Image: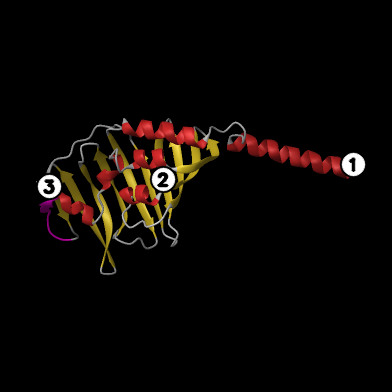
Amino acid sequence: MLPRRTLIGSLVLALAVGCTSSGGGGADLPAGPEVLSKASAGMKSVDSTHFVIAVDGELPDVPVKDAEGDLNADGESRGRAKVDQFGQLIEVEYVLVGQDLYFKGPTGGFTKLPAALAGQVYDPTLILDPDKGVAKVLADAKDAKTTGSDDGTTVVEATVPEAVAAGLVPGIDSDVKSTFSVREEKLTRAVFELPAGAKVTIDLSDFNKPFTVSPPA
């Protein structure tokens, strides 16, 4: 029988090896700032993407609770969203094309409005905006630290300055603790945790997949 101290040491070593093989290995993880820098450059080359946005908790100035759709770097987008209107969740469809916003509520058809009004609810096309979107957020994030890497996805925790975060998510009034998932030098998930307890998650996929946006009939 192994001495007790030797047995405990063997168990600790086995656990350490197991954690390293499943989590990507501490010392072998890429540096956080490098991961985010490459992802920022990678996102600047993205022409289109599918997005999913989820808001957990109350976020001032953002009535959208969740949204999903497609968008491109030309500022065109189509999708659906759930919007908090006077305490009730209403599902809407939208189309952003050219200088026009087409908006459809639970009843009736589409209503045509100026595209500038999209910002009063939430403008998803900001995601690919090089000056306000995810590329800017990744480039300006501070204190980046890689926390894991598994199956080709690297997870980095960082702090995003208030002014930069507010450009992407309106209503933010302080620096934001953030977690980024990066795969093949593209951002696949961003989670922003606000001091008041609200959380905003943005998932991105189908990079550069062609799609067309046209005014609804």
Q: Between marks 2 and 3, how big is the CA–CA gap?
A: 29 Å
Residue 61 in the image, given as x and y percentages of width and height: 29, 60
Percent of width and height locating residue 173: 37, 57
Q: Quadrant of residue 42?
A: top left
**SS under mark 1:** loop
Eye-nearest disc, 3 or 1: 3
Of the 4 image quadrants, the one containing the N terminus is top right
Identify which amino acid the numbered label 3 is placed on: Asp
Question: Rounded to the nearest whole Å, what is the CA distance between mark 2 and mark 1?
Answer: 48 Å
The residue under label 3 is 100
Q: Please give the name of the residue rendered at 25% of the width and 69% of the height, measured from the top-left corner.
A: 86
Type of amino acid under label 1 = Pro
Q: Quadrant of residue 170?
A: bottom left
Cβ–Cβ under 8 Å for marks 2 and 3: no
Dot 2: what SS?
strand
- Image check: 5 left or right of 79? right
Residue named by callout 2: 190
Image x and y of residue 93, in percent? 21, 52
Q: Earlier in the sequence, mark 2 or mark 1?
A: 1
Judged by depth in the image, the label closer to the viewer, 2 or 1, is 2
| CB within 8 Å, label 2 to label 1 | no
Q: Residue at x 79, y 38 (%)?
A: 10
| Residue shown at 40% from the left, 41% from the top | 140
In the rendered image, the vertical position of residue 41 relative to residue 169, given as above or below: above
Q: Which residues are magenta?
A: 107-114
